[in-house]
Each structure stands twice: as structure tokens, then as C-alpha cells.
Image: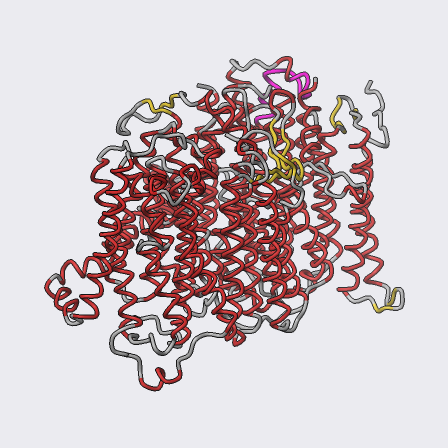
């Protein structure tokens, strides 16, 4: 007889809020389109979409609140079905908070973009929330089955969202491509899990750790296949080729969400898997990660140089960043894992910011995605140009920005772990990356605008999201672990939080 | 080495004042939709940089009251990066230090910077034609001042790197300021890319140094700490690939020193990274004066002096620096002889003078390098600003063939330019004489390979300096007027806000040399021997090798005499060729037309780089990675190839093999999967 599951409400609170939020939005959307007026305004599709976005952000904020409370308490709580499948600890909460903030920003960036395209449907926000639910489950999963469920729950809504702009052929193509290749990768992952189960007789991380034998070919094959599944999600070379196509085709807010949230969730899950189920110091794993890292940094950054489409360029850049992040995994030390966690936060804000500018520039039915579209922007839209310059500098890792801090932290950790070639590869590829990142500011400041922009205003949601991203990028560039606002009584030591959170993985 | 450190709370305002001005401009540019009045813009910008200068003077006054060996002011803001725990702990401070070395740089940067800010007011006035151009210019200028002051005041390598990148970025924005000309934007990009290559050297040097220090148990990037623990890593050996000459084992300090020098080469336009500086002249003239003559380009020299303890322990790296500097100095001087653009002549002149400074640091005479850095900042800024006045008077004509006889038309500009040319040529008793003499003396006594030839080359270059500067002077200000009649009649000297900086810089170009009398001159009795080279004495506590024995005084007098003769010969030759026998230069040119062609083409260095570096890089990303591997190899060879062979094998089994991209991607995934599993299970 199976014991009834022990459900403690606080463990599942973040997941609960996002899941319930998704359903509420679906119902609300159905009700809204039928009503004729609400709060004295006629319900147009745009109005309904805005209300849906607000509901989504409300539920995400609730999830953020409970996550922050959980992080502050520092407890580790386990959600148990037959086995323990989900654990809420500081590491999970740190990642969850990041994912939820990314969700809020994605919703804020989506509203007017979708209205411009005439596809501001409630299903969009419901799917985003569903995907975040899966992502949260994934980062807390301590069982292979939990990983699988979380991964699929996160990914399947994205298959739909990538094709959400149904009228556009490229969007459809992106969805199909992502779906087919994604399924292929999931199949590989699942096969790896099966092999691990075969070799160890269990799916629970802790039990796998006890039974794992690095010399057993079956177990190693299983680990290899699981790594491939994760490498696909984080878009590491040689499992990267879907990324540029899908990033280019999907609606820009979804691209932003994918490049940030999916990468962050997959990375945290991978960290937890390696640290608690395999053992971070396994030598063969380090070799594989080093190979992934070097290949991703080189191919990602070199390929980005020749791109003419900003979304594609950012796709290759995200491959390059994945390579940089993998350096932390090669070290296998708490410092390296903390550097990854911090890097993920930084990357989330600077990349969302960069996509945010692309979104804010999109015109009716036409993306502002060619590199040439940025010509002369410093004259016509000085604010957006300044923000874009900041995000590009940060992505390139210029000191004074968060991007530098993240890379620097990673390099220091790698050097302390007696590596020299990986950090040097990172430095060399970062220098190469300047060629394409800096191209955008060059075009913005040193070229005449090609045509007058058709949309000159900026929606308040976009403006707020961009301001937040820019503020975080600057703040973390100068105060990575320092309370800048002592006069407000506010301490925001993000780097310390990252360090604290990974101790949960290494503590036991 | 200086110990201790006195708190000085105002220090951080030196860089922050221009930063706030830049931010204020930025806010006004983005938020306020209409053009802000000229007066407000000027008040914000010039006020901020003047404030920096005043605080620098206050800091200087505070510092000189301290005893020699504890002249160090510090201002610690907060711990910038504190990463890791326990034995992995590591922190970088956001802190500033003001020692004699920083003091010289800070005073030069903020002082000359302030003068050039005022000059720009008049120079950029007509940029009202482009909306907000005037304000945008001052915004960039303030941002640059912030980055440059940060660079010289930083108390650790990481913070210095922040300034290092910042000045590069601003220089690039300012070179491309008049972007409507496509060439200007191109010049900006070129400067940026070449500087990136240099920065790579800087970062790798920093990484190596840090990893060595971490290995010795002192993970730190602060200058004071690096110097303190340097003795522990001075003898570390580094294994590099065996195919490198002189290997396989190197003293790590040499490698680190060379890495930092690559960074310095990029910033300071030394061979082989010198190609960007002449093109950078596309920017407005005040920018050339500030960034590409007085401040940013000297950052490389400052870096080497800052790390002087390291270079003093790395004789091989120092020798390479000395010879690179000498070759650059000679190359710059030779190329300056054939340029016809007034600013390009000065650009090559800057490059050549920077070469002099590197000769000095390569020979271990760090104080002489800093001395020349300071006097050169005054002289070259003066020449550039005077050239700017000429260009304004000529209505943006820069070709010296179209000038001539401007002496009467713009007398004030003429006099200041003449003072600058005399000073930089090294004519007694102007500033350039003393600083250049110190370098020549150092080159003579240097213990580097090929030492005597180093000295001879530098002496000849000193003569060439006088030749090309006075060629410029005579072509522009003397002889027959070649400008169109109408233009000549309308010419006038610039307004007061531009002339006053010229006068101040002229004064400095005349008198700044008095700060550093040669040690030998103490014998003459009219200066106190202890105080005679007060500039070097002032810097002695922070620079390595200051306690070295000088040359015998008789030798020094002989060298001084030679330097004076070289300057007089160059000046006289220019006078004779360009004033007395104006047809001769043309004859010389036509009888050596091949050589002239080579010089005008700048030895085709740009073209060689294009063929050797730029094209292969583009080819690698485009042809090899993109079309080659992604599309060609995977698609064409592997997928379709496999498909074709399968089709050939099972002619009827597979009726149709789709060769869509998804298949190609999956195929690559499989290949990768096999490779990874093989790597794991080996």
C-alpha cells in the first residue's frame, strides 16, 4: 500500500501560485471576452490582454513573496510522494526567485508587443505561467522523475509559445523545429535516466549517489545521455543548432524568456544533479564540461560575428555565455557553482534588457531585428539607445557592468582551481564578442537613421522592465555583494546569496 | 616602496565630479527634449573638470607635507568584489590611491583636461548645426575625464582596467563624433579593435600575475600588495610551448611584463599596434589634443611605470620594450616627414614621442619617462590646439600645401605654435630639452642588447623631430601664402576662450623643464645639487631602480651638447630646405620617389594586417564555421553524403530522403553524443 502523500503547503507554495494563476487566467480570459464592459471600459482584446498580464504578474509576485520568505528562513523542506521528489532549499529558492522575476519581466514586456501583433490572448500568459511552474519544479527536483516532469512541463508550453504568432511562417517553423528536436533531446534524456535506474536501481538523487559506480559503463552511458539532454536545453555546442533558428522565429518576448529562464532552470537542475547525484569532482565529467565550454565559447562567439539579425546574434551570444557558465561546472567547487548562480542572475537581466529593447522597437507586424534597424537610434530614441548600449557593454563584459562582475568572478574561481586555459579562452572569446556587441552602439551613434521610426512612444510596462534591468546591471556591476543603500536600510548582497545558496548542495 | 597611507576623503571626488557631469548631460539629453543652452552645458562640464583639478591640487598639497617615504593618500570607498569563503576568499576594493606617480598623472590629466575643455567651448561652437551635438560632445568629454582619472587613481588592477576600458570606449565615441563622414566612423572602429587586441594582453597579464600570486598564497590585485609580495613570485618559471624561441621555460615576470606591454602598445600606439593613431585624427581637434596627445595614449607608459618593480626584475622584457619604443620613435619621425595633413604630422609626432618614453622605461629610467610624459602632454597639447586654431582659420582645411604665410594673419596662434615646436624639438631652455635629454642620457647608459645603437638611433630621431616639426612650422606659417585670397583676408585668431588655454600651455612648455634639471648641472653652482633633479627625486620613492648610479658628469655634458646639436641641425636643415631653397624638397622627393612612395603608404602595414589578420578571421567565421561546417560539412558531406550512400545501398528501400535542416541538426547531435559518451567512458 502506498502511503498518502505528505504535502506540506509551504513547500509547494510557489508552484501552487503559478499553477493556480495559469488556471485563473484561462477562466478570466474566457469570462472577459464574453463581457461587454468592465470597470467602465469596453473590453477590447488589448484591454483583456492587459488584465490577463496583470493577473499573471500578481500571481508571480505572490510566488516571489513566498519564495523570498522561504529563502530567508533557510530551511530545507522536502515534498514526498512515494519518494522524495521535490525539495525546497535555499539553492532552489534562489533559482525560483530568479525564474519568477524573469516571468514578471516577460509579462511586462509582452503586453504591447502582443497587442501590436493582435495576438494578446489570455492563453499566452497562462502558458508562460505553466512553463514557469515546470521550471520551478525542475530546479527543486531531487529525483530523476521529478526532473523529467519539470522539464517537460517547462518545455511543452514553450513549443506552443514559440509558434504563438500563428500568422507568421517563421514562428510556425520555429515551433515545429523546437518541438521535433526538443523531443529528440528529451528522448535521449529519458533513455539516460532509464540506464541510470538500471545501473543503480533507484531514481532518487541521494540514493544514486550512494550506488553510483563511475567505472560502470552502463551508469556512465546513462550520465552521458542525461548530460546531452541538459546540454540541449542550455544550448551548448554541439547541441546548439536549434537555438538560432528558434530564437529568430519565436515572438521576441518568448525568445527572451527562453534564452533566460530555460537556461537558468536547466543550469540549476544540472548543478543539483551533478552535485548531489554524481559527485561534482568526478574527473570524466569535468573533461566533458571543459569540452562543452571551449566549443561553446568559440563557436558561439565566432558565429555571432557574422550575423545580420539581432535575435540570431543574441542566440549565438547566448551559446557563448553557456560556454562561459560551464567553466564553473568544470571547477566542481562551491565557488564555481556560486559563480554560475551569480552569472545566471546577471545574464537574466542583461539579456532580458537587450531583448526588451528589441521588443520596444518592434513595429506593427514587423520586428526590429535587422542590425541595420538600429542605425541612428541615438538620435531618434536616445533613451533606448543608451539602455541598449549598457546591455551590450554588459554582455561583452566591460568593467563597471554586471556582465564584467559575473565573468570576473568566474575567472577568479577558475584560476583558484588551477586552471589557466579555460579562463584565457573566456577572455579571448570575450574580446571577439566585442566585435558584434559593439556593432550595435556603433550603428546607433555613428550612422544616420535609415527611416523615421513609426512607433515613437514606449509602453509603460516596457519602460519599467527596461529601467529595472538597467538598474540591476549597473547595481551589480558596482555593488555585487554590498548594500549600496544603507540609508534605506536595504542590503542586497546578491553574490553572498549565491554563495550561501550553493552550500545546500555541498553541505551534506 | 611607500608604506602606510593617509586617509584623504576628497580623493574619490576627483574622478566622480566629471562622472556626475556626464550623467547630468546624459539625463538632460535623454529626458529634456529640447536643446539645452550653451552656457549651462559649458558650466556643467568645465566646472566639473575644474573641480577635479582643484581637488587634485589640494591632494597634492596634502601629500607633499608628508615625509618622503610615506607619501601615499588613500580613499577606500567599499569592498567592490568579495568572493569566496575561507581559504578561497578574495576581495577587490573600490579604492583610490594618490602617490607621487598618480599625482603627476592626475595633475596633468585634470589640468590639461580643464584647459582643453575650455578650448572646446570655442572650437565646437559651430556644432550647433547638429542638434544637441555640442552637449553630446561635452558629455563624452566628461565621461572620458572620469575614466582617465579613474585609471590613474585606481589602487588595484581591476579598477584600473575599468578606467582602461572606459577611456578606450570614449576615445572611440569621440573619434567617430563627426560620424556623417563614413571614414570617421571607420577610424573609430579601427581604434577600438586595435585597442581590444592590446587589452587582451592586459587581461592575460593580469590573470597570470594573479594566478602566480594566488599560488604563493596571496590572491590580490592591489598595487601595494602586489609590490609587497612580488619578491615571492619573482623567480617563478613558466612552461610555455617549446616552439617559442628561448624556451621552453621562461621566467614568469618576463611573460607577465610582455603581456602588460602588449596592453600598453595598444593604448600608446607602439609597433605593431600603432596603426590606429593616425586614423584617430578624424575626431575633432580638442579630442586629438586631450586623448591622442596628452592623456590616454600615455596610459601605457603609466602602466609600465606603475609596475616598475616588475619590469626592474624583468630585463628581457625591458629590452624588448626599449627596442620597440626606439623603432616606433624612428618610424613615427620618418613618417611624419612626408605627411601633408597638419594633424597627421602631429599624430606621428605623438607616436614618436611615446616611443621615446618607452625607450626610457625599457632602460629603467622610469622617472625620465614620467618627466617626458608630463612635458610632452603640455607641448603636444599646445601644438594640437594651435593646429586646431589654424584649421578653424583655414575653415577646416588641413592640408599644409594649401597653407603658408599664416604668421601675419593669425599672430597669436603663430607664436604659441612656434613655442610648442621649439619645445618639442628639444631646443634649450624649453621643457622638451630637459625631458628628452634625460631620456638620451638613460639610453646611453642602458644595459640593453645593442645599447650604443639604441642611443644613436634616439639621437638621430631627436634630430628628425626638429626637422619634421620645423618643416611643418615653415610650411604653415612662413613662406608664400598658398591659401585663396578671399580666405586669407577673412582669417583671424580664435576668441579668448581658445587663446587663453594656448597661452597657459605655452607657459608650461617653456618653464616645465625647470622641474627636472639634469643631475650633472648641480656642478654649475647655480642650482642646488640635492634638489637639481627634483622631479626624479619626487618620484623616487614609488619607482624602482631610482637608486641607480648616474653617468659621470663629463659624459653627461657631452651628451647634452650632442642633443643640442641634433636639435639645431634639424631646425637649421628645415629652415634651409623649406625657406631658403623651397624647390629642393620637391627635387629630393622626385629623385627618391620610390622611397617616398613607401613612406606615404606607411610601409603598407594596414594592407598587410588586412591580408594576414582581418580576412582570415572573417573567412574562418563565415566560410569555415558557417558555410563550411554548419552548412557544408554537416549538410553536404555527412547528412547528404550518408543519405546518398544509404540510397545507393538500398536503392528501392528508401524512396525519398528528405535533406531538411532538422535532420542535419539531429545528425550533429548524434555525432556529438557519440563523442561525449566516448569521452566519458574512455
Counting labels gives: 0
Please state, as top left, top right, bottom left or bottom right, where the C terminus of chain B lies in the image.
top left
Q: Residue at x 72, y 31 (%)?
A: A92
Q: Quadrant of residue B301?
A: top left
Q: Is residue A281 covered in magenta? A: no
Horizontal side of residue B399 vs A192, given as left or right: left
Horizontal side of residue A443 vs A263, given as left or right: left
Q: Is residue A201 covered in magenta? A: yes
Q: Quadrant of residue B158?
A: top right
On the image, the x and y values in percent for residue B30 come to: 64, 64
Look at the image and tell me whether residue A148 can be seen: yes
Closer to the camera, B547 or A498? B547
Q: Is residue A13 above or below residue B212?
A: below
On the image, the x and y values in percent for residue A123 come to: 74, 53
Horizontal side of residue A302 vs B21, given as left or right: left
Q: Is residue A311 above or below residue B395?
A: above
Q: Is residue B163 above or below residue B379?
A: above
Magenta highlight range:
A192-208
On the image, the x and y values in percent for residue A163 come to: 62, 53
Closer to the camera, A417 or B121? B121
Residue lying farthest to the right in this orientation: A39
Q: Residue at x 79, y 36 (%)?
A: A67
On the image, the x and y values in percent for residue B104 come to: 49, 45
Amino acid at each position: 500500500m502506498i502511503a498518502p502523500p505528505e504535502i506540506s503547503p509551504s513547500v509547494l507554495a510557489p508552484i501552487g501560485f503559478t499553477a493556480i494563476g495559469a488556471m485563473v487566467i484561462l477562466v478570466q480570459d474566457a469570462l472577459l471576452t464574453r463581457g461587454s464592459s468592465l470597470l467602465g471600459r469596453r473590453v477590447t482584446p488589448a484591454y483583456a490582454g492587459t488584465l490577463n498580464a496583470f493577473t499573471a504578474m500578481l500571481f508571480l509576485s505572490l510566488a516571489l513573496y513566498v519564495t523570498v520568505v522561504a529563502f530567508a528562513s533557510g530551511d530545507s523542506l522536502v515534498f514526498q510522494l512515494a519518494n522524495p521528489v521535490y525539495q525546497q532549499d535555499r539553492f532552489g529558492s534562489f533559482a525560483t526567485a530568479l525564474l519568477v522575476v524573469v516571468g514578471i519581466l516577460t509579462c511586462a514586456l509582452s503586453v504591447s508587443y502582443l497587442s501590436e501583433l493582435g495576438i494578446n490572448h489570455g492563453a499566452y500568459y497562462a502558458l508562460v505561467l505553466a512553463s514557469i511552474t515546470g521550471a520551478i519544479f525542475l530546479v527543486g527536483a531531487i529525483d530523476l522523475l521529478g526532473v523529467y516532469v519539470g522539464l517537460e512541463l517547462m518545455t511543452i508550453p514553450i513549443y506552443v509559445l514559440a509558434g504563438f504568432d500563428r500568422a507568421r511562417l517563421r514562428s510556425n517553423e520555429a515551433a515545429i523545429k523546437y518541438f521535433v528536436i526538443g523531443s529528440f533531446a528529451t528522448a535521449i534524456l529519458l533513455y539516460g535516466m532509464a540506464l541510470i535506474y538500471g545501473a543503480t536501481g533507484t531514481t532518487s538523487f541521494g540514493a544514486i549517489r550512494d550506488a553510483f559506480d563511475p567505472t560502470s559503463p552502463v551508469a556512465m552511458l546513462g550520465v552521458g545521455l542525461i548530460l546531452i539532454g541538459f546540454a540541449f536545453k542550455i544550448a551548448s555546442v554541439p547541441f546548439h543548432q536549434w537555438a538560432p533558428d528558434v530564437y529568430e522565429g519565436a515572438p521576441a518576448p518568448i525568445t527572451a524568456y527562453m534564452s533566460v529562464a530555460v537556461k537558468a532552470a536547466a543550469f540549476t537542475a544540472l548543478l543539483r544533479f551533478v552535485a548531489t547525484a554524481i559527485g561534482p569532482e568526478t574527473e570524466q565529467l569535468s573533461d566533458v564540461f571543459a569540452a562543452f565550454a571551449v566549443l561553446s565559447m568559440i563557436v558561439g562567439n565566432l558565429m555571432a560575428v557574422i550575423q545580420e539579425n539581432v535575435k540570431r546574434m543574441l542566440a549565438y551570444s547566448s551559446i557563448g555565455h553557456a560556454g562561459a557558465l560551464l567553466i564553473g561546472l568544470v571547477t566542481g567547487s562551491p565557488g564555481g557553482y556560486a559563480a554560475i548562480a551569480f552569472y545566471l542572475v546577471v545574464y537574466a537581466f542583461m539579456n532580458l534588457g537587450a531583448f526588451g529593447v528589441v521588443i520596444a522597437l518592434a513595429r506593427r507586424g514587423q520586428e526590429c531585428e535587422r542590425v541595420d534597424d538600429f542605425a541612428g537610434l541615438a538620435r531618434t530614441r536616445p533613451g533606448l539607445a543608451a539602455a541598449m548600449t549598457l546591455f551590450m557593454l554588459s554582455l561583452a563584459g566591460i568593467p563597471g557592468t554586471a556582465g564584467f562582475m559575473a565573468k570576473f568572478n568566474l575567472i577568479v574561481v577558475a584560476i583558484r582551481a588551477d586552471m589557466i586555459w579555460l579562463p584565457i579562452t573566456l577572455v579571448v572569446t570575450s574580446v571577439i564578442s566585442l566585435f558584434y556587441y559593439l556593432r550595435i552602439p556603433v550603428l546607433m551613434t555613428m550612422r544616420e537613421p535609415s527611416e523615421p521610426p513609426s512607433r515613437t512612444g514606449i509602453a509603460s510596462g516596457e519602460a519599467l522592465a527596461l529601467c529595472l534591468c538597467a538598474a540591476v546591471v549597473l547595481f551589480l556591476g558596482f555593488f555585487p555583494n554590498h548594500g549600496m543603500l544603507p540609508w534605506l536600510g536595504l542590503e542586497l548582497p546578491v553574490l553572498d546569496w549565491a554563495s550561501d545558496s550553493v552550500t545546500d548542495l555541498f553541505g551534506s | 616602496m611607500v608604506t602606510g597611507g593617509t586617509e584623504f576623503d576628497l580623493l574619490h571626488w576627483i574622478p566622480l565630479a566629471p562622472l556626475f557631469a556626464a550623467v547630468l548631460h546624459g539625463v538632460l539629453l535623454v529626458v529634456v527634449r529640447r536643446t539645452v543652452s550653451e552656457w549651462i552645458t559649458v558650466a556643467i562640464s568645465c566646472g566639473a573638470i575644474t573641480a577635479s583639478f582643484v581637488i587634485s591640487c589640494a591632494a597634492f598639497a596634502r601629500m607633499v607635507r608628508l615625509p618622503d617615504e610615506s607619501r601615499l593618500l588613500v580613499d577606500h570607498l567599499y569592498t567592490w568584489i568579495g568572493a569566496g569563503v575561507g581559504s578561497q576568499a578574495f576581495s577587490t576594493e573600490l579604492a583610490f590611491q594618490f602617490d607621487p606617480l598618480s599625482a603627476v598623472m592626475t595633475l596633468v590629466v585634470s589640468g590639461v583636461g580643464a584647459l582643453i575643455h575650455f578650448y572646446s567651448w570655442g572650437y565646437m561652437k559651430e556644432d550647433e548645426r547638429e542638434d544637441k551635438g555640442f552637449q553630446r560632445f561635452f558629455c563624452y568629454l566628461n565621461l572620458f575625464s572620469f575614466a582617465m582619472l579613474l585609471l590613474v587613481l585606481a589602487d588595484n588592477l581591476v579598477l584600473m582596467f575599468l578606467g582602461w576600458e572606459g577611456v578606450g570606449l570614449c576615445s572611440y565615441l569621440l573619434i567617430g563624433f563627426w560620424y556623417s563622414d563614413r571614414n570617421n566612423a571607420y577610424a573609430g572602429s579601427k581604434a577600438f579593435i586595435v585597442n581590444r587586441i592590446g587589452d587582451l594582453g592586459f587581461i592575460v597579464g593580469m590573470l597570470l600575475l594573479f594566478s602566480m600570486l594566488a599560488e604563493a598564497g596571496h590572491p590580490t590585485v592591489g598595487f601595494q600588495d602586489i609590490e609587497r609580495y612580488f619578491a615571492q613570485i619573482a623567480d617563478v618559471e613558466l612552461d610555455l610551448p617549446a616552439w617559442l624561441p628561448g624556451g621552453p621555460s621562461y621566467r614568469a615576470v618576463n611573460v607577465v611584463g610582455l603581456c602588460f606591454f602588449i596592453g600598453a602598445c595598444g593604448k600608446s600606439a607602439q609597433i605593431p599596434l600603432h596603426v590606429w593613431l593616425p586614423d584617430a585624427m578624424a575626431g575633432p581637434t580638442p579630442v586629438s589634443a586631450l586623448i591622442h596627445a596628452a592623456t590616454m595614449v600615455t596610459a601605457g607608459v603609466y602602466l609600465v611605470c606603475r609596475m616598475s618593480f616588475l619590469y626592474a626584475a624583468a630585463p628581457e622584457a625591458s629590452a624588448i620594450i626599449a627596442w620597440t619604443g626606439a623603432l616606433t620613435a624612428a618610424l613615427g619621425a620618418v613618417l611624419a616627414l612626408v605627411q601633408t595633413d597638419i594633424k597627421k604630422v602631429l599624430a606621428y609626432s605623438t607616436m614618436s614621442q611615446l616611443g621615446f618614453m618607452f625607450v626610457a622605461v625599457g632602460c629603467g629610467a622610469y622617472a625620465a619617462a614620467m618627466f617626458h610624459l608630463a612635458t610632452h602632454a603640455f607641448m603636444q597639447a599646445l601644438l594640437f590646439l594651435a593646429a586646431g586654431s589654424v584649421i578653424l582659420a583655414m575653415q577646416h582645411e588641413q592640408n599644409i600645401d594649401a597653407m603658408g604665410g599664416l604668421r601675419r594673419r593669425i599672430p597669436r596662434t603663430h607664436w604659441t605654435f612656434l613655442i610648442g615646436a621649439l619645445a618639442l624639438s628639444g631646443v634649450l631652455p624649453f621643457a622638451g630639452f630637459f625631458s628628452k635629454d634625460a631620456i638620451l642620457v638613460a639610453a646611453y647608459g642602458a644595459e640593453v642588447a645593442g645599447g650604443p645603437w639604441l642611443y644613436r638611433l634616439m639621437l638621430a630621431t631627436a634630430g628628425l623631430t626638429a626637422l619634421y616639426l620645423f618643416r611643418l612650422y615653415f610650411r604653415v606659417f612662413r613662406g608664400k601664402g598658398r591659401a585663396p585670397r578671399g580666405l586669407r583676408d577673412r582669417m583671424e585668431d580664435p576668441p579668448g576662450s581658445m587663446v587663453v588655454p594656448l597661452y597657459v600651455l605655452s607657459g608650461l612648455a617653456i618653464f616645465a623643464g625647470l622641474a627636472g634639471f639634469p643631475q650633472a648641472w648641480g656642478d654649475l653652482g647655480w642650482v642646488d645639487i640635492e634638489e637639481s633633479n627634483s622631479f626624479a627625486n619626487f618620484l623616487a620613492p614609488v619607482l624602482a631602480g631610482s637608486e641607480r648610479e648616474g653617468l659621470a658628469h663629463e659624459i653627461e655634458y657631452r651628451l647634452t651638447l650632442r642633443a643640442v646639436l641634433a636639435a639645431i641641425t634639424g631646425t637649421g636643415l628645415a629652415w634651409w630646405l623649406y625657406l631658403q631653397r623651397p624647390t629642393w624638397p620637391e627635387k629630393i622627393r622626385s629623385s627618391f620617389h620610390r622611397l617616398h612612395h613607401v613612406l606615404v603608404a606607411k610601409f603598407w602595414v594596414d594592407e598587410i594586417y588586412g591580408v594576414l589578420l582581418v580576412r582570415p578571421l572573417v573567412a574562418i567565421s563565415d566560410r569555415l564555421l558557417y558555410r563550411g561546417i554548419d552548412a557544408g560539412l554537416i549538410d553536404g558531406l555527412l547528412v547528404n553524403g550518408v543519405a546518398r550512400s544509404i540510397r545507393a545501398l538500398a536503392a528501392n528501400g528508401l524512396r525519398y530522403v528528405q535533406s531538411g535542416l532538422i535532420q542535419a541538426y539531429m545528425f550533429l547531435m548524434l555525432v556529438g553524443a557519440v563523442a561525449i559518451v566516448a569521452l566519458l567512458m574512455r
